[in-house]
Amino acid sequence: KQSVVIAGGGSTYTAGIVMMLIENQEKFPLRQLKFYDNDEERQSIVAKACEVIVKERAPEIDFLATTDPKEAFTDVDFVMAHIRVGGLSMREKDEKIPLKYGVVGQETCGPGGMAYGMRSIPGVVELIDYMETYSPNAWMLNYSNPAEIVAEATRRMRPNAKIINICDMPVAIKKSIAEIVGLENESDIVDRYYGLNHFGWWTEMTDKQGNDLMPKLKEHLVNYGYAAAGGEENPLLEESSWMDTFQKAKDVYAVDPTTVPNTYLKYYLYPDYVVAYADPNYTRANEVMDNREKNVFAECERIAAAQTAEDTTIEAGEHAEFIVQLAGALAYNTYERMLLIVKNEGAIANLDDDAMVEVPCLVSKRGYEPLSMGKIPHFQKGMIEQQVAVEKLVVDAFEEHSYQKLWQAMTLSKTVPSASVAKQILDEMIEANGEWWPKL
Ligand code: G6P
Ligand code: MN
């Protein structure tokens, strides 16, 4: 049986992760579940409810919430990390500052992602150090964003750490695809995919019998995007801007119909459209605060007051399913095939070895083994190399406290039209981030 600490105990996703873990007790049995957060007030809202949930549904699991790193990280097999350094209020600034200058305002893409990256790096490195101090044999499954920048930073700064960076986006898209092609389960799809996190392309998809799923999927993409299949979402949340990501997929697909895109590519290929339809005064952070955060916290407080979660609306987060799958593969040697963010080292043949890429990997007790995706075409290679350079420059800027490097990063991003716009955004972001950033 496993012991898990969730770092980011106060996240609006945490209760859904707990539900998911409880539902998976056969596949991935727990002896202990701990929450860790540096925001005690936030964590305690979620923890009080989860304590009730665990007692009611899986009383064999020891539950504990703490802000003490030693207590949190001692005697654990897995650290599931999904921290948001600066919280949703800083996310709001990441989104709104670029929009003022007509640039994509997004959590992980463009200048917002870079700003968030500068805040996240020390937070994630700190978690690695806690883990290595108190449970040196544990694995950290990291889905803290911006995953690409965090992955590049941890590759450089903690090269031997047992950290695996992963994202739910490919799984979420594959769920939509499974519906489109008439398969029950996302895991029935065998895929070939290459790129970066939130920035990649599928080249092949078959079912387990080897039947090609691409023709049917492509026909659907031309007609509807992924939209028709993306409708089932968490009832706790109104998903307007999120759903739009799926709707734009067909235009992204149109640019290269030999592949099937990750929907986030719309931010790089159609930034003008994204900005035109964005509300600079009300962004995704506002939606999340006004909907998911309010609803989840209210529901947690209700559970804590009633001391029962029998009729709760909190559901096992689909968002969390992949993380249980990954942990299970590592613990029980299942050789599951999953898309992970790993050091390239030849997986994409015509790309630098030290780029952090998202490719299919086989996951087992020994860790992960990336599969070779071969050479990629000029279009994708050009886009990927540009984006990798952006991410590397952000990490350079962090390490060297370099204004110049961060300005270069913003200038180079496909989402930003010029060096002067990049500079205006950067200067405002330095102000807004204050102590969250190293002094440039
Ligand atoms: C997807 C991405 C995550 C991101 C999330 C944001 O799941 O893969 O990296 O954090 O969307 O969702 P939200 O509902 O907070 O906008
Ligand atoms: Mn993601």
Image (cartoon, helix red, strand yellow):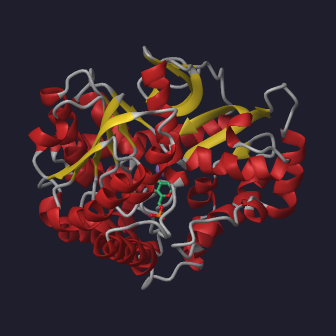
**Side of 309 relative to 215 (left or right):** left
Q: Quadrant for the N terminus, please.
A: top left
Residue 234 x, y percent position in the rendering: 56, 66
At x 42%, y 40%, the residue is: 389
Regarding residue 189, the answer to whether it shows in the image is no
Q: Quadrant for the C terminus, please.
A: bottom left
At x 51%, y 52%, the residue is: 319
At x 50%, y 41%, the residue is: 24
At x 34%, y 47%, the residue is: 59
**Side of 149 relative to 180 (left or right):** left
Residue 15 vs 237, above or below: the answer is above
Report the label total: 0
Residue 351 vs 38, above or below: the answer is above
Name the residue nearer the viewer: 75 or 244: 75
Residue furthest bottom in the image: 281
Q: Quadrant of residue 159?
A: top left
Regarding residue 219, the answer to whether it shows in the image is yes
Name the residue nearer the viewer: 257 or 297: 297
Residue furthest top in the image: 366
Residue 346 x, y percent position in the rendering: 53, 17
Residue 405 x, y percent position in the rendering: 27, 47
Residue 273 x, y percent position in the rendering: 63, 72
Residue 301 vs 19, above or below: the answer is below
**Side of 402 relative to 187 (left or right):** left
